[in-house]
Amino acid sequence: MKVLKFGGSSLASSEQFAKVKNIVNSDKEREVVIVSAPGKRSAEDNKITDLLYLLHAHIQYGVSHESVMGMIKDRYIEIKESLGLSTDIEKIINETFEKVNKKTSADFIASRGEYFCALLMAEYLGFEFADATEWVEFDYKGKVKAKKSEEKLRELKKKHGKIVTPGFYGAYKSGDIRVFPRGGSDITGALAAAYLGADVYENWTDVSGILMVDPRIVPDSKTISRITYDELRELSYMGASVLHEDTVFPVRLKDIPVNIKNTNEPEAPGTIIAEAFEDESSEEHERFITGIAGKKNYSIINVYKSRIGEAKIKLIREVLELFDNYNIPVEQVPSGTDSFSLVFPSESLGSRQHELMHELEENESIDSCGITEGVSLISIVGRQMAYRTGISGRVFKTLGDNKINIRTIEQGPDEINIMVGVYNEDFDRAIKLLYESFAKEK
Ligand code: ASP
């Protein structure tokens, strides 16, 4: 049995709905469908969820909301009428919004995007509509009650067979609606797949899988065919705009693979995410790396103390404590004989730089300290790294040959990534060069 989640761009119009139906009907294992709210039809278009938050703001400020409501309604009416559906979505939307007032929560209003969409999709596919409030239950701290929610979903599945359920929200025991963070339909999909013990969780979007590198830097980047959850975690942590590993954690726990697929190109195999791949082909074994991701705007604070010797550990601890008090997430702590540095996102220090430097200079165990700004971190990720030699050599040679100065270097203990720090102005060029160097391999 397969659980499918369709993102907003896959549901943006009646045309997209038709593609979804073809996909679902082409495989009888596809029994459970989670939908987002309709997304943008073009770059200038609006996402329904954004319009709903706007609607909520209009209501709060007592501004007329007729035109926003009209925009929302038109989107659903287009889908209903073009597909010849009988669900009276206009009436349902009107009745919903007649009841809202200043006290209505933003969560309730935002959740309606997925709700209306699921009503239409259920009729169109001939599946049963199962509201998310019937199974996703939150405790009052906002955590999903896993056992309860699983029981309820299993019950619904048993009763109805094939179901469509809205993503993005659930309800407290009181019945009040609560939404997940933005993009949260991915979480609903992962929960459903995990609770039902699906064979695979198919996440349908508008790209044919996860790309090796940001397409804004390398427009013709290759797609990753297989990636482990650990690799995905590294890439998404370093800013790759892919499915975040956190969101698929429920399926990871149950060892269920995720398949990222493209609604507009359903034949493409997409990307498979799994815990490990026992049956790697020789080609995959040969592959040097899986992907490259990076983030700009880090700062480095360098601390010097001559003949520091054994006192180094104590000093590092003191400085780390200071950073902790400032709530600065330290990314790396490279160290030399009489010095060490701390690498952290510049925005986490904000305007407190002088304050922090002052506190460091007050420390009598420090001879001097300095700050370097405008550094980017680039992570080169690949599960084959632990078994192959020469990868770091190639990274350094590629950057060195092109006169790109490497400011910091780090390799994770599990040997699935190498991270280098370069100056911001070299960021795009470094990523391009590294990609070209590695992508040439198979
Ligand atoms: N519709 C919601 C959003 O735009 C949730 C989702 O699409 O996953 O954030």
Image (spheres, helix red, strand yellow):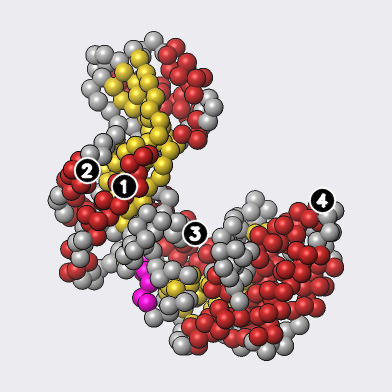
Taking 315 as reference, is 156 left or right?
right
x and y, in percent, of residue 397 in the image? 17, 44
**Are the two marked residues, 2 and 1, in contact with CB atoms closer than 8 angstroms?**
yes
Q: Nearer the observer, disc 4 or disc 1?
A: 1
**Where residue 209 appears, x then y in whole percent?**
39, 68
The residue at the point 62 percent across, 70 percent down is 38
Residue holding disc 1? 429
Mark-to-mark CA distance, 2 and 3: 38 Å
Judged from this view, the residue extending furthest toward the left is 389
Indicate which disc residue 61 carries: 4
Left of 41 or right of it: where is 394? left
Q: Is mark 4 within 8 Å of ligand 1?
A: no
Mark 4 vs 3, N-terminal side: 4
- Residue 65 bears which disc, if any? none
Q: Which residues are magenta?
A: 268-275
Q: Position of residue 215 (x, y in %)?
A: 39, 59
Q: Amino acid at mark 3?
A: Thr
- Secondary structure state at the residue bearing disc 1: helix
Instruction: Verify CB contact (< 8 Å) between mark 2 and mark 3.
Output: no
2 vs 3, front mark: 2
Tell me the quarter of the picture where residue 58 sits. bottom right
Whether residue 228 is visible to the viewer of this picture, yes or no, is no
Q: Nearer the viewer, mark 3 or mark 1?
A: 1
Please name the residue that numbered disc 3 is placed on.
247
Where does label 2 land, which residue? 402
Q: Nearer the viewer, residue 435 or 233?
A: 435
Q: CA distance from mark 2 to mark 4?
A: 56 Å
Cα gap from disc 2 to disc 1, whole angstroms: 9 Å
Q: CA distance from mark 3 to mark 1?
A: 31 Å
Closer to us: mark 4 or mark 3?
A: 4
Examine the rendered structure and indicate whether residue 409 appears above or below residue 30: above
